[in-house]
Amino acid sequence: MSEAGRIGVWIVGARGSVALCTLAGAAALRAGLIEPTGMVSELEAFRPLRLADPGRFVFGGHEIRPGDLVTAAARFHRRTGVLHPDILRRVRAALRRADARIRPGFTLDRAAGAPKVAAGVHVGRGVSPRALVDRVRRDLRAFQGAERLERVIVVHLATTEGVASERVSRLDWRGFERRLAGRTAAGFTASLLYGWAALSERMPFINFTPSPGAEHPALAELAAAQGVPVAGNDGKTGETLVKTVLAPMFLCRNLKLRTWFGYNLLGNDDGAALADPRRCASKLKTKDAALTRMVQDPELRSKVTIDFAPSLDDWKTAWDFIHFEGFLGTRMSLQFCWQASDSALAAPLVLDLVRFTERSARLGESGPLTHLGSFFKAPLGVSEPDFHRQFARLLAYAGAGGA
Amino acid sequence: MSEAGRIGVWIVGARGSVALCTLAGAAALRAGLIEPTGMVSELEAFRPLRLADPGRFVFGGHEIRPGDLVTAAARFHRRTGVLHPDILRRVRAALRRADARIRPGFTLDRAAGAPKVAAGVHVGRGVSPRALVDRVRRDLRAFQGAERLERVIVVHLATTEGVASERVSRLDWRGFERRLAGRTAAGFTASLLYGWAALSERMPFINFTPSPGAEHPALAELAAAQGVPVAGNDGKTGETLVKTVLAPMFLCRNLKLRTWFGYNLLGNDDGAALADPRRCASKLKTKDAALTRMVQDPELRSKVTIDFAPSLDDWKTAWDFIHFEGFLGTRMSLQFCWQASDSALAAPLVLDLVRFTERSARLGESGPLTHLGSFFKAPLGVSEPDFHRQFARLLAYAGAGGA
Amino acid sequence: MSEAGRIGVWIVGARGSVALCTLAGAAALRAGLIEPTGMVSELEAFRPLRLADPGRFVFGGHEIRPGDLVTAAARFHRRTGVLHPDILRRVRAALRRADARIRPGFTLDRAAGAPKVAAGVHVGRGVSPRALVDRVRRDLRAFQGAERLERVIVVHLATTEGVASERVSRLDWRGFERRLAGRTAAGFTASLLYGWAALSERMPFINFTPSPGAEHPALAELAAAQGVPVAGNDGKTGETLVKTVLAPMFLCRNLKLRTWFGYNLLGNDDGAALADPRRCASKLKTKDAALTRMVQDPELRSKVTIDFAPSLDDWKTAWDFIHFEGFLGTRMSLQFCWQASDSALAAPLVLDLVRFTERSARLGESGPLTHLGSFFKAPLGVSEPDFHRQFARLLAYAGAGGA
Amino acid sequence: MSEAGRIGVWIVGARGSVALCTLAGAAALRAGLIEPTGMVSELEAFRPLRLADPGRFVFGGHEIRPGDLVTAAARFHRRTGVLHPDILRRVRAALRRADARIRPGFTLDRAAGAPKVAAGVHVGRGVSPRALVDRVRRDLRAFQGAERLERVIVVHLATTEGVASERVSRLDWRGFERRLAGRTAAGFTASLLYGWAALSERMPFINFTPSPGAEHPALAELAAAQGVPVAGNDGKTGETLVKTVLAPMFLCRNLKLRTWFGYNLLGNDDGAALADPRRCASKLKTKDAALTRMVQDPELRSKVTIDFAPSLDDWKTAWDFIHFEGFLGTRMSLQFCWQASDSALAAPLVLDLVRFTERSARLGESGPLTHLGSFFKAPLGVSEPDFHRQFARLLAYAGAGGA
């Protein structure tokens, strides 16, 4: 029996640093240790939506890494300064409870740079994808049952994967199901199977990573058929956020963008994974696309470069150089440098997305949640790349959906 | 007899570098030498407004400095690289014609750092302000008559003044008139008298500087009574533009701004004038106000500093450091560096403002043109400080006013 | 009875953040918790000097603030992330022992922005400077006696003071003594009296701040007469260090420096103190002097600005803009941004200075230690401003003094 | 018959932008239009060396591009703002004279990104390298004869090549000669053949590029045998210069460098060439080596990235991010941004190198000129990477060689 208003949040990648900040943050909010700074859903404008209280979320998830959340959190603080011991001390019990709900996950990635995987969960070629999906579904149902949850939202936070094979990328629902029944998972990526499992269980699926997860046509068909909301892709936390705010400024002033080069340094597991060119391709696609979709000028030369700098750990440091032409052919420049903890930026957005998505599920909204475009680098079902317009869409939703 | 569609642009500060770029740019546009890059009014969205062709504007103005436009333009290029000789060669005749229409101006500023003033035009304490206003009005009427202009727009581009005396700042129309008749101009600033003269002649007045010009209550009354449009204050060309685009981003993400310090280096006459603390006060007021009006958080510590760096000349270089707090109390930062020719940014906006204002005058709109808020640091009659919302207002105006 | 090799370090400003990092760092070194990163004296080149082991220093000092070192250290970590709890836990006992040796200090500064002072230690006009000096001397002797120290080095780390009065600044030894006997301390600054007390006790005096401390002519006479070494002024930790490395590069390349503007943001007590223009003057003098002494070009426009940004706390953030002219009159630029914990940079240099100075005292060197020039912004007795040459001088000293 | 003191400078890549600035600059110096800003050899310290007057150099060279110097110079100014028309007007005659002495060069590079090559000078596989060398030698002798030059210095300024084949790279003199006689130039690079030709004519050879030119063991043998000075490689004009000044600062302070990533944007032909990964490899080698040779810490992660940004043209823009660890494990950072015209920086150094090398040749110094190490990224025969020490070596040379 589920309990009314009891919301489960199932995180794929449950011991990664974004998950750590999300879980510890939710517990700290509940305990009144922190303010909801960085949570969009706490803005005055969204009060009428009566979103679920993040302090009451019940967390579980899949993880391929060994270890436990408390140790990981202490280590995260030592390396980054984020998640202060004063807070950690008081959310330790909550982390332990969540830890007990984490199940072994799987990955299909063997790439160099992949995080070290606990024995047994790495999946070889001889395993049926259907079996993987079924295992995930069992875990999800068990979570919901054991915790008496009215509703479970699945959030994909696992390290960026490579792209799926071309053949798999083009499958429709029927083809996808047929291939699931095959004898090998080759061509699939884990996020596709996690997403398929969630939607099959009528659980909303949020893809916060650039992995192919939520945008596959077969998953879209499934979400529609099941009447379940989906949202993604790739949380817009930092440099890309600034880009989608600055680029419209140049366009409004009829200034011609000539060069926009972004140089990103990353030191966390995500950075390590992106040292693998195949995975990096996924990421660069969503990062640069935001810009080129906005500007659409063949004379703009744009590029995003990502380098792995372990000493920075979670502190993403990005330098963007913007060269533009104004009146009388004058060339001028703007450069910016963004220095921020990627996980501390992402975690509150994860809580926001769960809250908005939970409401949609509750009200029966399904398919891509296009009012959530401002949260993503490559928002599902949204062609508008301008942040302020994406955000105006969310405000309009809140106005329409309030009371 | 005026000629239909013949538009005059009267510039106070007609040999300054913004004026140079405006005049040379308009002539270069007419000759097809440059594209209208940097002109907002050339965006597709404003085509339905059928704005006047800037290539056909007839320029004149007041100036306190000696010299001529062609020499000033050559000097400007040598010092800044802007206004290439290839262009200058082909607009020389146009500059000479405009030069012939420039009349001696006046200033009431004796501050250190004021640009050197031609003998005779600096106005001492014994001169009646009414006489100054009357001389300006005669010059404006003579310009309109001699050039057979259907309409004249007056644009204030002269170097930033100090603030008017408190007593003068509070005068209403009646009081202003009475004081005009007095024996001394003390307490007034030149921009107030230029503005009064323009409005008295029913000529729209645009104040592109932080000088008190357009915002005085008596001028507002006069504009309303005369049915003439006014616009101002202080063109939003660079650092402040970026601020009014970035600050809303932080607000939309519920991130707490803690420190926002802007450090501006300027090397042109404007920079020299701002080395005078009294004038600088005018400027800093409009620059910082844009931010504090947006953020309204007592915990934000913000400040704008301006230093004079002659070697930069017109190439304003501004560094902004933004320190903000996110989830879990994490402190993060964004810094940006803006390097741009102030005059090359300002000139197309001056042409834009003249075009929009001319249309308003033609259609009988009067008083503060609130749809032009996105052009100014401290827009007259506009409380919205967010650039993208100010711009949406302009788009709405174009939608409403089109066809 | 003193114990051979037992070295005391007496810190004026003993609970400030530099002192905290110095004391905790020395204890952590002793416990093997950290490496001596940032300590110049640990470079291979200085091994032959057989400098004293900083892990064995005995610390005491004067402080005007209430509180205790352990609480201050915990608070420092919460605000800055420096001095991790894992370290703090294991040096707590050492901090407590040092705390017990701290005596109430005094200040002569009433300026706004001065740190809050414990009741009773702020010194009014009616107090005789001689009495203050005597009290300090008693404290120093008591420290040496109680701890059986072979030698005590006094280090001035207290918050930047204003400058001394002109009259006091020019006093010679005799005049200084006479004025000490007067009925008021007005005109003196605390650092002068601390320095006088230390030298009178034949204890070496190191002034790590821009306060007038060590450079007063009367103190120089006293140091010479007593045969005691002195060193100062103002530790070269960050932005100025970079300056004294970069400026020679431009000179070696015969590039003409035109503009060098440094904009410093500081959020710690030092920053708060510098919000007081009188104190700031002391600081700016040493910071800008380093540059102008190197460059000596009337066409260089240089300036240092310091602003108080509490959210940064100890994390000094400095942006320098350097505009230079090269071949064919081409103007080019270099900008740099320094982001560092001032105290974490200063603390190892304090340990270095104590070690080098202790050796000098042991070997009978006296007067200004000119081989320590590379440690200071305004090195006593050193006219060479180029960091690499100053450092070569230290290497030469080590070569000469080794074995 | 040669004329005493008449010095020829033969430039390989004679119409490139560095050559343009060198030739125009030398003529402008002669005409007294500019000061020798940026010329190291004009520093007071080098006056005793009585270096040759650069205003009297006679220029010639090889070039593979069509066109003429005057047109190229005008185009260069339009694109970069460097080489002002006021100067160009007065050096036009000198450029025309030099143009008349430029002979068709050759390239062995077919890479994408190579500058467009005039028909006939691109060399296919069927051409004997000996024939190429002989042609160059004939051109050099003709230049010397026609202009009655006492001495000719050959400077390699042509666009960065790919590396030579491994087999060619390892040849000794004998092997080199044997392979020259072969039927194909494959495996060689043009700079090797130009260098061989120069040295065979006993003309000093300066390689200002990262091309393999001067460092080949066979060329070193030849230079020694002929008694001719050589110098190279890769002029240290900008970002690397700053690196070799800043890295020693960190070392002197015992701060641990953890990450040093340099991101370079270039828009000139050099940038275009470096878009070809093979050529880029040559460049990155010399750029990163300077750092790793200095630091030699396995924990330092360093990298240099170069991207092609055509809108910048000659205005190299480089951002370096330096992450370092200090006391108590504190991680701090320095970032710098260098914005400079590569050619305006390089040209005076080319004149310097010619002057110093000419003196060496005159005095009979031969082999690698190790006192010129401060001019190069990867100085021939010099292992010291610290700029200030390299420069001290040059000062010492001047002290020794003066009078």
Image (cartoon, coloured by chain):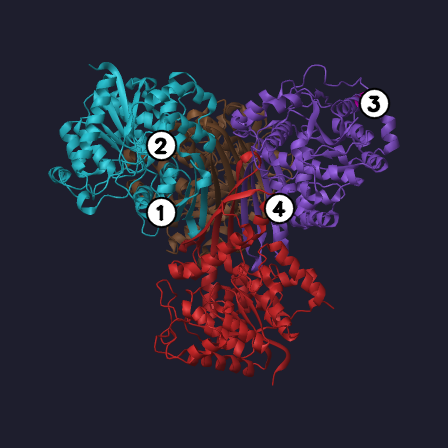
Chain colours: A brown, B cyan, C red, D purple
Quick check: marks 1 and 4 in contact, CB under 8 Å?
no
Mark 3 vs mark 4, foreground winner is 4
Chain of the residue under the numbered disc 1 shown in the image: A
How many residues crowd mark 1 within 10 Å: few (<14), some (14–19), many (20+)? some
Q: Amino acid at mark 3?
A: Arg
Chain of the residue under the numbered disc 4 shown in the image: C
How many residues crowd mark 2 within 10 Å: few (<14), some (14–19), many (20+)? many
Quick check: marks 3 and 1 in contact, CB under 8 Å?
no
Same subunit, labels 3 and 4: the answer reads: no
The residue to which callout 2 is attached is: B16
Q: Amino acid at mark 2?
A: Gly
The residue to which callout 3 is attached is: D130
- In the rendered image, the vertical position of residue D266 relative to residue C124, given as above or below: above
Mark 1 vs mark 4, foreground winner is 4
Under circle 3, the secondary element is helix
- Find the distance from the CA under tag 4 to the CA under tag 2: 38 Å
Mark 3 vs mark 1, foreground winner is 3
**Nearer to me, B294 or A232:** B294
Q: Amino acid at mark 4?
A: Cys
The reply to whether the magenta stretch includes residue B72 is no
- Find the distance from the CA under tag 2 to the CA under tag 3: 63 Å
The residue to which callout 1 is attached is: A53
Quick check: marks 4 and 2 in contact, CB under 8 Å?
no
Same subunit, labels 1 and 4: the answer reads: no
